[in-house]
Amino acid sequence: MNYVVHYCKNKDCNNAWVDEDLTNAQTRPPMWKYCDECCKKYGFVNPATPPHRDNYETRLKQIKMFKFQAKKINENERKLSA
Ligand SMILES: [Zn+2]
């Protein structure tokens, strides 16, 4: 397990701490967690796992698939109207 300096997600808070690197530091520094102080102070709850990159990639794939289908439909319509 790697460790990396996290910055608090709360922009008004300047806390930084060393924590497990769950994202391979895809964002530098990781800012998806609130520090302990903010959690206690504001009742923030940190997710157990970082917002996952897979979600983004899955959505990208869906968008690409949609565009592909839309293109096919357009082509079919063109063929029909020709
Ligand atoms: Zn904080």
Image (cartoon, rainbow, N blue to C red):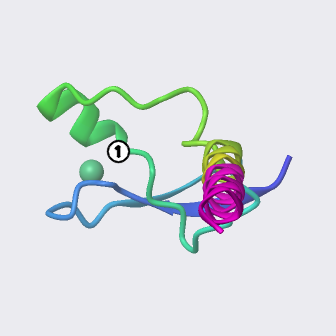
Report whether 18 appears left or right of 40: right
Residue 15 place in picture, x, y as percent? 32, 61
Which residue is at 63% across, 42% downward?
55
Which residue is at 44% across, 59% downward?
31
Q: Label 1, secondary structure: give it.
A: loop
Residue 80 place in picture, x, y as percent? 66, 56
Which residue is at 54% across, 71% downward?
29
**Magenta segment range?**
64-82
Q: Residues within 10 Å of mark 1 (few under 14, many from 20)?
A: many
Quarter of the figure that contains the C terminus: bottom right
Q: Which residue is mark 1?
A: 34
Q: Is residue 75 magenta?
A: yes
Where 6 falls versus 19 (above or below)? below
Our reading of the magenta stretch's main secondary structure is helix
- Quadrant location of residue 33? top left
Q: Is residue 59 magenta?
A: no
Amino acid marked by disc 1: Tyr
Which residue is at 23% across, 55% downward?
10
- Quadrant location of residue 3? bottom right
Residue 20 place in picture, x, y as percent? 69, 46
Tell which residue pokes out farthest to the bottom in this image: 28
Kindly tell me whether mark 1's CB lies below 8 Å from ligand 1. Answer: yes
Looking at the image, which is closer to me, 12 or 80? 80
Report whether 82 appears left or right of 15: right
Tell which residue pokes out farthest to the right in this image: 1
Residue 40 place in picture, x, y as percent? 22, 28
